[in-house]
Amino acid sequence: VLVVASRVSPAAAVWAMLVLTPVKAGLVLFFFMHLKYEGPLLKGMVFTALAVLVIFISLLFLDISFR
């Protein structure tokens, strides 16, 4: 998929990676880290931690963009 997208345009390759990377991370979380078989409390804690990480990274980029 990335090879085909990179032949179309560099922007398409970036968008393809932005789509495929979270999908791959989700598969790793659910299957290799066995999150699929855990209870809702642990799943909620993992997703809360990831949401906080995304918020902090977006605030960092927001701060850098206004300098």
Image (cartoon, helix red, strand yellow):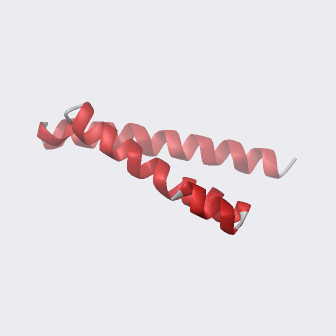
Closer to the camera in the image, 37 or 13: 13
> What residue is shown at x 83% (from left), y 52% (from top)?
66
* Vertical relation: 12 (above or below) 40: below
Left or right, 21 with respect to 49, comes to: right
> Based on the displayed image, in which of its 4 quarters is residue 60 positioned?
top right
> Based on the displayed image, in which of its 4 quarters is residue 9 positioned?
bottom right
Residue 36 position in % (x across, y down): 17, 42
Q: Residue farthest to the bottom?
A: 8
Closer to the camera in the image, 63 or 29: 29
Residue 20 position in % (x across, y down): 47, 54
> Based on the displayed image, in which of its 4 quarters is residue 64 positioned?
top right
> What residue is shown at x 54% (from left), y 46% (from top)?
55
Q: Residue farthest to the top?
A: 33
Left or right, 55 with respect to 8, comes to: left
* Number of marks drawn: 0
Q: Residue farthest to the right?
A: 67
> What residue is shown at x 26% (from left), y 43% (from top)?
44
Residue 52 position in % (x across, y down): 47, 41
Closer to the camera in the image, 58 or 1: 1
Left or right, 61 with respect to 52, comes to: right
